Amino acid sequence: MTTNHELFQRARQLMPGGVNSPVRAFKSVGGEPFFTERADGAYLWDVEGDRYIDYVGSWGPMIVGHNHPAVRESVERAIRNGLSFGTPCPAEVTMAETITRLVPSMEMVRMVNSGTEATMSAIRLARGATGRSKIVKFEGCYHGHGDSFLVKAGSGALTFGVPTSPGVPKANADLTLTLPYNDLDAARALFAEQGHEIAGLIIEPVAGNMNCIAPLDGYLQGLRELCTQSGALLIFDEVMTGFRVALGGAQAHYGVAPDLTTFGKIIGGGMPVGAYGGKRELMEQIAPAGPIYQAGTLSGNPVAMAAGLAMLELVQAPGFHDRLAARTRLLTDGFQSVADGEGVAFSTNRVGGMFGLFFTAEKVTTYAQATAADSALFNRFFHGMLKRGVYLAPSAFEAGFMSSAHSDQDIADTLEAARGALREAKG
Ligand code: PLP
């Protein structure tokens, strides 16, 4: 039998860090990743035959559980007709009709192949449409690995950004301004100073890449007003929240319409898909309708569209998101009472089908609070859970994802594991 360790040894010889995406390598929590052989419903099985209740869900797409028959069969039907055509295909039209119906702020849409492509394209459009160069992002928000996004705040809120990765030109980072999430006064100050130079403000409307942090009441509305007043475009990066926190995404949940939206994850049903879209007069500036260039050999791929359409069909079931939110609540309330019972300082956040677990007694609403929580305790807890057959995101700074395949028994088993893992982790 091949073991996880053997595979990781081989992988490390040939792939940077042994993986094709950094967080999978367990660097943040320590130890070595397991290699998944198959997945079904709420579970992953590794190559050694161990089963895990999975709260990562392929980092978000698997909202109906892994290997859902309706998604799989839709893909199987599509495959019989060929894998890629390089011409328009009918499923792309159905996809555009579905997205624009479910998300009314999106009057037109362009399909791409990842969340990163969607966000990169959205800011190009914002720059092209406004004739301005600066963009605003938030510390702790992640928008994929485009140069403009791998930037953190400089020494003061109004200074130029600093690259967070070698290879990102300083000239590029200079154009990215970074603000603290959930601080409307900081945003007001920035816009008062530089609003006329800002092409767009991009935000995860519920932050899911600094653990899970919801926007404070009125925060997204406040950002909407600042953008409208200054002529900057408001871009909601709903790669994670789209079709998850509500059928119409965070914009439906909070009642704030952005100018542009980006999607990924769920919209591809597990295939590599992203999308961006928004107001018609903006989207008509994209090539070939307009001059702003963006293209993709495999964009709108028929197999990927088949997976995504089947997934979007499933999440439209009446009451789907209410049930998902109730299940998430059962889990986070359960974690809280286990932690309280063990006398561990702990708090949770949740919006719809996403959640965050924090080893701090405070209610977490800022990046500073999220980073101040006890991540060493989280890392021990993570490994205790893994040992007990529960897979949480392998980092204290990632959101957790619920799926409709998680049963009451899975949640009860998770909480039982949590009791043991916490007892062990707190030392
Ligand atoms: N935007 C958000 C909010 C994300 O969470 C991610 C990925 O996790 C991305 C963009 C990038 O998407 P992808 O990994 O598909 O490029």
Image: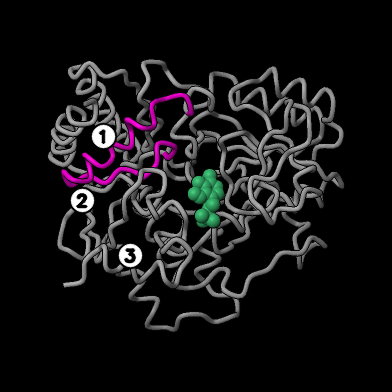
The amino acid type found where label 1 is placed reads Arg
Task: Give the SS element for disc 3.
Answer: helix
How far apart marks 1 and 3 lie (CA) works out to 34 Å
- Choose the circle earlier in sequence order: 3 or 2: 3
- Choose the circle earlier in sequence order: 2 or 1: 2
Occupied quadrant, residue 121 = bottom right
Residue 98 percent location from the top left of the image: 50, 55
The amino acid type found where label 3 is placed reads Phe
Q: Residue at label 1?
A: 327
Residue 281 percent location from the top left of the image: 76, 50
Q: Is residue 86 magenta?
A: no
Task: Between residue 103 and residue 167, name the one nearer to us.
Answer: 167
Residue 52: mark: 2
**Structural crowding at the residue carrying mark 1, measured as other residues with C-alpha within 10 Å and reported as few (<14), some (14–19) or many (≥20):** many
Mark 3–mark 2 CB contact (< 8 Å): no
Which region shows up in magenta?
Answer: 371-398
Task: Give the SS element for disc 2.
Answer: strand
Q: Is residue 393 magenta?
A: yes
Q: Residue at label 3?
A: 8
How far apart marks 3 and 2 lie (CA) works out to 19 Å
